C-alpha cells in the first residue's frame, strides 16, 4: 500500500508532474495538497496553470479566484496570482474584469512587470495580446535543473522518478547524476544510478496483469515478447480523472499492448481505461489499466498494466483470430 503523503509532498510532486506535462496526475496531487490550509492557495494557483496548459481557461479563472481566498498567501504571491488571473481573463475577452485585476496589481506593486503598459493598452481600447520578445530555443532540461538547484534535492529526485516511470531513461540518468554531484549520499542515489535498466539499456516489460515486471533486454534486432497482430477495432479510452478521453481505432493488438489512432492528444505516462469493441460490437470488454508509452500526432501506444483474466482470454482470442486471417 502506498505510504500516505503529506501536503508538501503532494504539492512538490505535482510541480514535477506539471513540469513534464502529465497534467491529470499533477491536478490530482494539487487537489490533495489543497486540503491543507497552508497549501490551499498555492495548490489552487498551480491547478489554474494546469488548466491553462490544457486549454480550460474558464476553470483556470475559478481556480485563481479560489486561490485568492487563502489567508496563507503572501502579498507577493497574491500579486503574481492576480496578474495571471488578469492574463487569463484577457485571453477570454473579459476586459472589464481584466482591468480590475490589473488595477489591483498596480495598487500593490506599481512597477510589477508590464502591468502599467497593459492597463494603458486596454484603457485606450487596445485588444489582443501585447507583443512579446520571442523566446530562444534552449535545452530546457538543463535550465530546469539549474533552477531547482536552489531548492531542496527532493524535487529533482522526484523528477528522476517521474522520468523513469514514463520510460525516458536518458533524462532519468541526467537528473540522478546531477543529484549525486550535489550530494553523493542523498537517499538511494548510488543504487538508482546503478540500476540495470539505466546503465545497460534494459527496459521493464509491461505486465499483462498486476505484479512485478520482468526485465527484458531489448536491442535493435530483439523481438517483442508478444507478437502484435494487425487489427482494426473501435475503442474508447479515458483517464481516471476524466481529463483525457475519446474514441479511436485500435491497431496492432498484442497481449501486452496496442496502438491506437485517434484525434485526441494523449500525454505520455497517462494511465487510461480502454474499452475495446469486437467486430460484432455486441460484447465490448474493458482493460482496467493501460499506460501511454509513446505518443505521436493522431496515434499513441498503450502498455496494458491491469487486465482481468477473462479479458486476457478475449485479447488472446482476438490475436489468434487476427493471425489466422493474416
Image (spheres, rainbow, N blue to C red):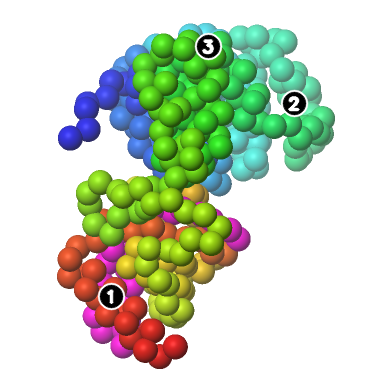
From the viewer's side, name the closer residue of 311 and 111: 311
User: Up-down: is 298 above or below 188?
Assistant: below
The residue lying at 55 percent from left, 46 percent from top is: 55
Instruction: Tell me if I can see residue 211 in this picture.
Output: yes
Residue 72 x %, y %: 39, 11
Question: Is disc 3 surrounded by few (<14), some (14 to 19) or many (20+) residues within 10 Å?
Answer: few
Residue linked to disc 2: 118
Do residues under tags 2 and 3 come within 8 Å of each other at their CB atoms?
A: no
Quadrant of residue 124 in the image?
top right
**Residue numbers of the magenta segment:** 273-297
From the viewer's side, name the closer residue of 127 and 36: 36
Q: Is residue 208 left or right of residue 138?
A: left
Q: Tell me the quarter of the image containing the C terminus.
A: bottom left
Residue linked to disc 1: 316
Q: Identify the residue at the far bottom of this view.
A: 325
Q: Is 175 colored magenta in this rendering? A: no
Instruction: Tell me if I can see residue 80 in this picture.
Output: no
Residue 234 x %, y %: 40, 77
Residue 257 x %, y %: 38, 63
Say whether disc 2 or disc 3 marks the residue closer to the N-terminus: 2
- Residue 204 marker: none
Q: Is residue 106 left or right of residue 185?
A: right
The residue lying at 31 percent from left, 21 percent from top is: 7
Say whether disc 3 or disc 1 marks the residue closer to the N-terminus: 3
Q: Is 281 colored magenta in this rendering? A: yes
The residue lying at 50 percent from left, 50 percent from top is: 267
Residue linked to disc 3: 182
Q: Main secondary structure of the magenta part?
A: strand
Amino acid at each position: 500500500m502506498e505510504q500516505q503523503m503529506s501536503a508538501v509532498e503532494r504539492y512538490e510532486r505535482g510541480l514535477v508532474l506539471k513540469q513534464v506535462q502529465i497534467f491529470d496526475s499533477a491536478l490530482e496531487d494539487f487537489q490533495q495538497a489543497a486540503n491543507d490550509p497552508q497549501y490551499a492557495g498555492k495548490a489552487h494557483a498551480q491547478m489554474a496553470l494546469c488548466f491553462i496548459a490544457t486549454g480550460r481557461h474558464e476553470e483556470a479563472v475559478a481556480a485563481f479566484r479560489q486561490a485568492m481566498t487563502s489567508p496563507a498567501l503572501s502579498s507577493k504571491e497574491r500579486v503574481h496570482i492576480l496578474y495571471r488571473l488578469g492574463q487569463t481573463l484577457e485571453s477570454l475577452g473579459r476586459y472589464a474584469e481584466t482591468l480590475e485585476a490589473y488595477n489591483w496589481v498596480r495598487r500593490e506593486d506599481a512597477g510589477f512587470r508590464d502591468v502599467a503598459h497593459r492597463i494603458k493598452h486596454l484603457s485606450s481600447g487596445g485588444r489582443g495580446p501585447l507583443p512579446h520578445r520571442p523566446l530562444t530555443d534552449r535545452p530546457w532540461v538543463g535550465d530546469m535543473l539549474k533552477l531547482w538547484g536552489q531548492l531542496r534535492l527532493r524535487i529533482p529526485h522526484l523528477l528522476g522518478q517521474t522520468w523513469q516511470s514514463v520510460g525516458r531513461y536518458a533524462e532519468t540518468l541526467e537528473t540522478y547524476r546531477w543529484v549525486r554531484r550535489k550530494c553523493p549520499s542523498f537517499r538511494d542515489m548510488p543504487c538508482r544510478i546503478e540500476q540495470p535498466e539505466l546503465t545497460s539499456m534494459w527496459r521493464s516489460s509491461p505486465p499483462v496483469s498486476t505484479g512485478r515486471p520482468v526485465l527484458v533486454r531489448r536491442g535493435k534486432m530483439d523481438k517483442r515478447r508478444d507478437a502484435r497482430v494487425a487489427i482494426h477495432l473501435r475503442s474508447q479510452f479515458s483517464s481516471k480523472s476524466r481529463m483525457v478521453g475519446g474514441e479511436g481505432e485500435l491497431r496492432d493488438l498484442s497481449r501486452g499492448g496496442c496502438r491506437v489512432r485517434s484525434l485526441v492528444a494523449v500525454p505520455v505516462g497517462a494511465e487510461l481505461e480502454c474499452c475495446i469493441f469486437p467486430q460484432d460490437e455486441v460484447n465490448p470488454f474493458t482493460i482496467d489499466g493501460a499506460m501511454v508509452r509513446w505518443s505521436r500526432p493522431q496515434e499513441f501506444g498503450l502498455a496494458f498494466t491491469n487486465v482481468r483474466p477473462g479479458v486476457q482470454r478475449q485479447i488472446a482470442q482476438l490475436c489468434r483470430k487476427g493471425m489466422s486471417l493474416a
